[in-house]
Every structure is written in structure tokens, then in C-alpha cells.
Amino acid sequence: MNVFAKDNNYIASTYGRFPLEIISGKGSLCYDREGKEYVDMGTGIAVNTFGFCDQTWIDAVTAQLNRFQHVSNLYYSSPCADLAELLCVKTGYKKVFFSNSGAEANECAIKTARKYAEVKKGKEYYNIITLVNSFHGRTITTLSATGQEVFHKDFTPLTEGFIYANANDIEDVKSKIANNKVCAIMFETVQGEGGVLPLEKNFVKELSKIADEQDILLICDEVQTGNGRCGKLYNYMNYGIQPDIVTTAKGLAGGIPMGATLFNYKTKDVLKAGMHGSTFGGNPLASAGAISIISRINDQLLDEVNAKSEYIINSLKGAKGIKGVTGAGLMLGVEVEGDAKKIVNECIKRGVIFLTAKTKVRMLPALNISYELLDRALTVLKQVCAEEL
Ligand SMILES: Cc1ncc(COP(=O)(O)O)c(C=O)c1O
């Protein structure tokens, strides 16, 4: 049985996969079983921060693998402590909780917000405002936080206590705060799965001001936007705000599952011993991988991310079949006149892997992709967009 048949037979049918099997990769190139080469513009949805099989990352992870692969969180181990210190020093946050995915990082933030409000204001302050069109994960609670009906309909009853306000509509947020007992506001600075839509700067600043005035926690979901993706270490830094909790995952450990929830001075000691935990959270391999990634996200790299972002936007400007580009840094959505899914399928046939986000072609290339490979990918995209009208 080939992999397509075996997968269809034995793997739960939750994914609509493209007809592509990757068997190896290096940097921003990867290969299928027939030896065909592809430029990877998706990095496994913003996970392979420095591309496939980055040597520095492999060395860090294998060095840890030769020491020990796992210890329980009942004991101390330095990889996760070193990583937490690195994240705190680079961001100014005070403490970190480690988990294994974006959804878990958000679950931790939600639990923290409810506990914080219970102690400060009372148990009835359990509501969390999230935004219409947001995406926060697929567990029942993060699904409930997600402001998209399409994800809700098959899984009711949802977790109680999520209220959806319109993005970039501060009056809507204010009225929802006035009419409900609210403990937190949770948002992505760029709605990734929602269509690569950045929030307006003024709206985010106002959110932060209101949250601060009313002691409502501000939770920034940086699962997709974080770890250098949008041209700063975390994209809240582009908005001049300091959320009370920042969540991240995806590119954090460069390809090993890891989530992190960062707490500021207000939230760092809300969760006490026994209130939360994770068997694999802060796993030594994931921590070693993440140290290798986060320690290399410096100003020089971030300048390159921003320069490449501008380069892509300029290269696509005015191209036939392309209406515009949204997003930030190397998290970009291309508004196309044709059908995004068809365009992505055709690009794969021609050796370039893009993603979709709603009706857009999405790109999330490795932060260190070369201009030469960017050119190759953009040439194919422009050709296909011009043809697929
Ligand atoms: C903004 C955001 N939050 C949360 C998640 C969920 O992350 P995970 O799939 O690692 O649970 C995603 C995944 O796409 C995301 O983009």
C-alpha cells in the first residue's frame, strides 16, 4: 500500500490533504518520493522557523538527545529553565508555563484569566471577549474562544463564557464589557486562519488601555504571529502594547511540539502548585530546540524578515490575477482573483508549496529563506495567478 492509500485507510479523516508526500528537506527546499524538488513557502504552517533540518538546530537537539530525552515535571531540569530565562530576558515577561501546542498555551491563559478574576473580582467574572473571525485552537474550550461559527456547529454545547466582538470595532468591545462580567480580552494581532488580517494599531492600543483601566487581562495569542514571524520577536511589540499574557507555539521549537504561556508581573503567580500541569510540557528536546531558535532571533534576522516582506509585497504589486497582499513580516496573505485552493494545487505541481487562508494564498516561509528561492516561488505564483482566472 502506498502512503496515500495507507493514510486514507488508517488515519482519521480529519485532514483534507494535498496530494503530496515529502520525504526529505534541507532549508527551504524539500523533495518527494520521485525526487522532485519543491520550494517550501509554508514551513509546516509556521513551524520550521529556519527551514528543514537546520544544522544548528539539529546539533542542539541531538546534543540534548544524547544527555536525556525526558524527565517528569516533578523534578528540575535545565533546558526548560534556560529557555524560560531566555524568553523572559528577551521579552520582559516574568514567568513561563510550557505545554505542547497552541491550543494548550491558550487553555493555560484562559484558566489563568478566570482564576485571576475570581480572586480579584469574584467568580462571576468568568467571561472572555474574543474577536469575530479569530482562531484559538481545537480543544472544546479554545474552539469556544474561536469567533467562527463554522468551527462551533458540530460540537455544541461549547464551553460557556466567550463573547465575540467585532475586530477593529472598539465601541462593540466597550459595550460587551459594559454588559458582561469580563475577566479578559483575547486576540491575535494578525488573524491567521481567519485570512491573514492584521488588527488596526489604534484598535489594539484602545483594547490595551481599556483592559488596563478596568483590570481586565489582555491575552495576546502569538501562536502563529510569534517567534520572529512578523518582524519582531513577538508581534505585540509592533503595536506598542504589553499584554498581561502572551501565548505562543508553532515556530517556537522549530519543529518539535511546544507551547508557551508568558506571564507578566500581574499574572505570574496566579496558578499555584497543582492547578495546572502537563506531562510533556517543557520537554528537554523541545526546550533545546527552542533555545536554538529563540537565541538566533536577533535584530539582524528581524531586519531581514522585514526586508523580505517588503520584497515580496513589491514583487506581487500589480501582478495579473493578484489583488493585494495583507499580513506582517513573513506571514502574508495574497488576495487572488482566482480560486486560492486551485492556485495552491497548481503551484505544488510546479514545485512550490503555498498554503491557503480562507480565500487567500498564504505564505509563511522560513525566516532565513534566500532571495533566490523567494524569486523562484514568486515567479511560479505570478504565472499561476495570471493563468487561473
Ligand atoms: C492563532 C492560533 N492560535 C492557536 C492555534 C492552535 O494551535 P495548535 O494547532 O498548535 O493547537 C493556531 C493554529 O493554527 C493559531 O493559528
Image (cartoon, grey):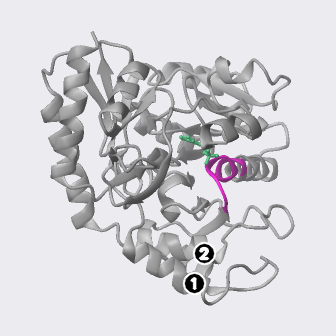
Residue under label 2, please give it.
285
Please provide percent x and percent y for residue 134: 56, 30
In the rendered image, the vertical position of residue 315 relative to residue 288, given as above or below: above
The quadrant holding residue 13 is: top right
Residue placed farthest to the top in the image? 389
> Which range of residues does the magenta coloring cover?
99-107
Query: Residue 64's mark?
Result: 1
The quarter in which the C terminus is drawn is top left
Estimate how packed mark 1 is, as few (under 14), some (14 to 19) or many (20 or more) residues with alpha carbons within 10 Å: some
- Amino acid under label 2? Leu
- The tag earlier along the polypeptide, 1 or 2, is 1
> Which of the pair 25/91 is nearer the observer?
25
The residue that appears at 16% across and 51% down in the rendered structure is 371
Q: Secondary structure at mark 2?
A: helix
Residue placed farthest to the front in the image? 1
Please provide percent x and percent y for residue 257: 61, 60
Q: Secondary structure at mark 1?
A: helix
Q: Are marks 1 and 2 in contact (CB under 8 Å)?
A: yes
Does 345 appear in magenta?
no
Query: Residue 86's mark?
Result: none
In the rendered image, the vertical position of residue 73 relative to residue 210, given as above or below: below
Ligand 1 is found in the corner quadrant, namely top right
> Which of the pair 291/48 is nearer the observer?
48
Asked whether, in this view, residue 273 is left or right of residue 358, the answer is: right
